[in-house]
Image (cartoon, rainbow, N blue to C red):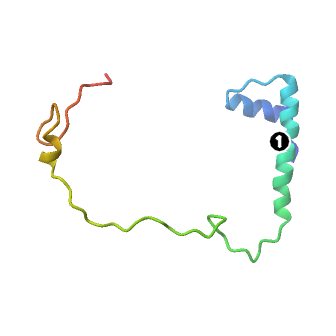
Amino acid sequence: MSVTRDDVRHVAQLARLDFSEEEEARMAEELSEILGYVEKLDELDTAGVPPMSHVLDVTNVFRSDEIEERIDRGQALEPAPDADNEHFLVPQVVE
């Protein structure tokens, strides 16, 4: 696939980028090369390759959920400089 300078200008406009004429030409050439490499992947026979979500065979490493002793709401709010029965009260930051 060949990327034109018009394509580069369009993408640059969407990304709010400003390229010089020289940079546009270089970007068009580099993007064409990158897309050429991606097109080579279409030549691979992947019929027997199962889909995967990750290159490495990794498993979930989350710890199991366990019920732990917690302090109750009253104990948590006790040292607060300002609180009601359920919440910490803080000064308004955003108007």
94 sits left or right of 37 in the view: left
* Rendered position, 42 above or below 31: below
Where, by quadrant of the figure, is residue 7 drawn? top right
Question: Which image quadrant for residue 9?
Answer: top right
Instruction: Work out whether residue 80 or residue 15 is closer to the camera in this orientation and state it.
Output: 80
In the displayed structure, does residue 64 sit left or right of residue 20?
left
39 or 73, which lies in front? Answer: 73
Q: Quadrant of the C terminus?
A: top left
Q: Is residue 20 left or right of residue 59?
A: right
Q: Residue at x 78, y 25 (%)?
A: 19
31 vs 40: above or below: above
**In the rendered image of this protein, does residue 20 appear above or below residue 11?**
above
Residue sitting at x 82%, y 62%: 42
In this rendering, would 36 be left or right of 91?
Answer: right
Count residues near mark 1 (Cα–Cα under 10 Å), then give few for <14, some for 14-19, many for 20+: some
Residue 17 in the image: state x and y as whole percent: 71, 27
Closer to us: 50 or 91 = 91
Coordinates of residue 72 in the picture (x, y in percent): 15, 52
Looking at the image, residue 83 lies above or below residue 61:
above
- Judging by the rendered image, the residue that carries numbered circle 1 is 31
Q: Secondary structure at mark 1?
A: helix
Q: What residue do we see at 16% from left, 31% from top?
A: 81
* Amino acid marked by disc 1: Leu
Nearer to me, 79 or 38? 79
- Which residue is at a point 40% across and 66% down the rendered structure image? 63
Residue 44: x and y in percent read 83, 67
Question: Where residue 8 sits in the image (x, y, percent)?
Answer: 80, 33
